[in-house]
Image (spheres, helix red, strand yellow):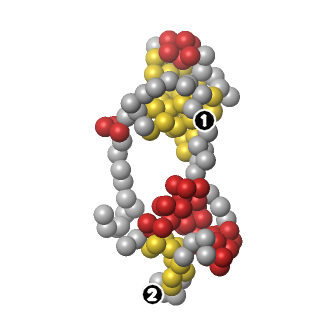
Amino acid sequence: MALIRVSEAARFLGVSDDTVRRWLDNGTLHGQKDKQGRMVIDGVELAAAAKSASQLPEDPTGVGSSARNRFVGLVTNVTMDKVMAQVELQCGPFRVVSLMSSEAVRDLGLEPGSVATAVVKSTNVIIEIPQGAKA
């Protein structure tokens, strides 16, 4: 069972340490003391809390798609040469970078401040764990 410290839980949930402590005090989350006496939260419970607390922006494309990994965000930067472009999106706390043709950038009208959706097929996603963590 993964045990997550209060400060880490706060970072994963996008709230302050004090908010996590209040949630522990009022029973929204349940904690326990680890061997060092620090308050920790079960990783499974924290994952469920993160999922239920997430507020995804509505996907403005309105298209049907088999891709389930969709990140709506704002274009923050476009670097383009004659043939290729690098487009950066800020999707909540995550930076997503896409390489595409310059023609595609022009056709889509992508520029800083544009709303866009990054679509990721699961066959191209790499999962990593913290160094020293046991999978």
Give residue 14's quadrant in the image.
bottom right
Please give the name of the residue rendered at 55% of the width and 45% of the height, measured from the top-left corner: 94
Q: In which quadrant of the rendered view does residue 126 lie?
A: top left
Mark 2 secondary-structure assignment = loop
Q: Residue 111, how many percent across, how many down?
A: 63, 22
Task: Locate residue 21, reporting x and y percent.
Answer: 64, 75
Three-letter code for the amino acid on which mark 1 is drawn:
Glu
Quadrant location, the N terminus: bottom left
Whether label 2 touches label 1, CB < 8 Å = no
Q: Residue at x 53, y 78 (%)?
A: 31
Point 65% across, 79% down: residue: 25
Q: Secondary structure at mark 1?
A: loop
| Res. 77 in view | no
Give the quadrant of residue 74: top right
In this view, the residue in front, 107 or 60, is 60
Whether 56 is drawn above or below 66: the answer is below
Can residue 80 be seen at all in this image of the molecule? yes
Q: Is residue 61 left or right of residue 132?
A: right
Q: Is 49 positioned to the left or the right of 121 in the image?
A: right
Residue at horizontal 46%, vertical 17%? 101
Q: Which residue is mark 1?
A: 58
**Nearer the observer, 117 or 75:** 117
What residue is pinned by disc 2? 35
Q: Quadrant of the C terminus?
A: bottom left
Classify mark 2: residues with Cα within 10 Å, few (<14), some (14-19) or many (20+). few
- Looking at the image, is 122 positioned above or below residue 35? above
Q: Nearer the viewer, mark 2 or mark 1?
A: 1
Q: Residues within 10 Å of mark 1 (few under 14, many from 20)?
A: few
Residue 33 x %, y %: 51, 85
Question: x, y (%) of residue 57?
Answer: 61, 39
